[in-house]
């Protein structure tokens, strides 16, 4: 993604008329599933007015995160597309801020004082550092309570995002990877000579080393030391898989 393309997409984002969800007071008391459906997120069981074609992730989010509902959180979503799930999270976690990273923010439909949107390629180190500068946090600061990777789903991108952003997760925070088995199903999302996420999950659980050019031994030691538990689930679709890493 070159500078001109990013600039064009950011210009389209600023010119585009968006829905101000802060005016929608009725949404403040809706369930997470209803919010996902209302704003058009495929995390719901039902999406785009069709039955059972969503991922069905709502119950897993509630199982792991419902106790955080009323806390003041910093939530980072990588791969926000039109902002549907960001809108839902900003209503459900009503005391929280949501930070969105997407390579094409021109698709964004919603606006809120609680949603902060950044056009960037989250998988590139320069974009990662530029983002930290924009939100005024250091390369070592633990800032986010929840980090959600719903980006490109390419294996090397998933691993690079994990390497860049995991260090910024607070104690007792959750790092979530949606659709993490897509590289198992689709060759164009698979990276040669890198372990798939299901193998990494098993390796971290057993504290067993794995071969990776992206996640070196030092980073693996961080995962072994700092991940307190891992919960992975299968959703509605054949390719619907989500994993929650909780940090000590």
Image (spheres, rainbow, N blue to C red):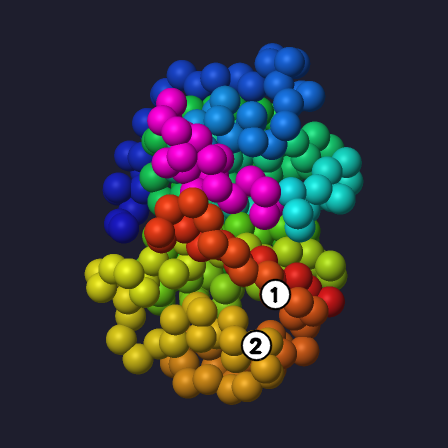
Instruction: Confirm whether residue 1 shows in the render.
Output: yes
To which quarter of the image does residue 137 belong?
A: bottom right
* Label 1 or label 2, whichever comes before in sequence order: 2
Residue 171 is one of the magenta-drawn residues: no
Give the residue at x 40% y 34%: 52
| In this picture, residue 186 sits left or right of residue 179 | left
Crowd rating for badge 1 (residues with CA inside 10 Å; few <14, some 14–19, many 20+): some
Give the residue at x 74% y 61%: 171
Q: Quadrant of the C terminus?
A: bottom right
Decide: is 231 above or below 61: below
**Dot 1 and dot 2 residues touching (CB under 8 Å):** yes
Tell me residue 87's x, y (percent): 54, 29
Compare residues 245 and 132 and report the one nearer the observer: 245
Tell me residue 182's x, y (percent): 34, 58
To which quarter of the image does residue 246 belong?
A: bottom right
| In this picture, residue 180 sits left or right of residue 146 | left
Compare residues 186 and 82 and report the one nearer the observer: 186
Tell me residue 224's x, y (percent): 62, 78
Q: Which residue is mark 2?
A: 204
Q: Secondary structure at mark 2?
A: helix
Tell me residue 194's x, y (percent): 35, 76
Boundaries of the magenta span: 43-61
Residue 55 is one of the magenta-drawn residues: yes
To which quarter of the image does residue 9 belong?
A: top left
Decide: is 90 above or below 73: above
Compare residues 182 and 104 and report the one nearer the observer: 182
Secondary structure that dominates the magenta span: loop
Residue positioned most to the left = 188
Q: Which residue is mark 1?
A: 230
């Amino acid at each position: 993604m070159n500078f001109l393309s990013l600039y064009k997409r950011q210009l389209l984002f600023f010119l585009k008329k968006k829905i101000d969800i802060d005016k929608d007071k009725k949404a403040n008391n809706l369930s997470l599933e209803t919010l996902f459906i209302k704003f058009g997120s495929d995390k719901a069981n039902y999406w785009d007015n069709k039955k059972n074609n969503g991922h069905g992730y709502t119950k897993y989010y509630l199982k792991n995160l419902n106790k955080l509902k009323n806390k003041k959180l910093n939530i980072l979503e990588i791969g926000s597309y039109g902002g549907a799930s960001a809108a839902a999270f900003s209503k459900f976690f009503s005391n929280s801020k949501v930070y969105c990273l997407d390579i094409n923010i021109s698709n964004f439909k919603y606006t809120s004082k609680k949603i902060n949107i950044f056009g960037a390629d989250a998988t590139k180190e320069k974009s990662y550092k530029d983002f930290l500068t924009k939100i005024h946090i250091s390369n070592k600061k633990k800032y986010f309570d929840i980090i959600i990777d719903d980006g490109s789903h390419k294996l090397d991108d998933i691993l690079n995002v994990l390497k860049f952003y995991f260090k910024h997760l607070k104690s007792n925070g959750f790092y979530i990877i949606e659709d993490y088995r897509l590289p198992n199903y689709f060759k164009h999302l698979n990276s040669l000579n890198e372990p798939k996420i299901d193998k990494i999950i098993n390796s971290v659980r057993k504290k067993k080393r794995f071969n990776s050019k992206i996640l070196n031994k030092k980073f693996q030691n961080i995962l072994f030391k700092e991940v307190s538990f891992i919960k992975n689930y299968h959703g509605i679709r054949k390719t619907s898989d989500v994993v929650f890493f909780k940090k000590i």
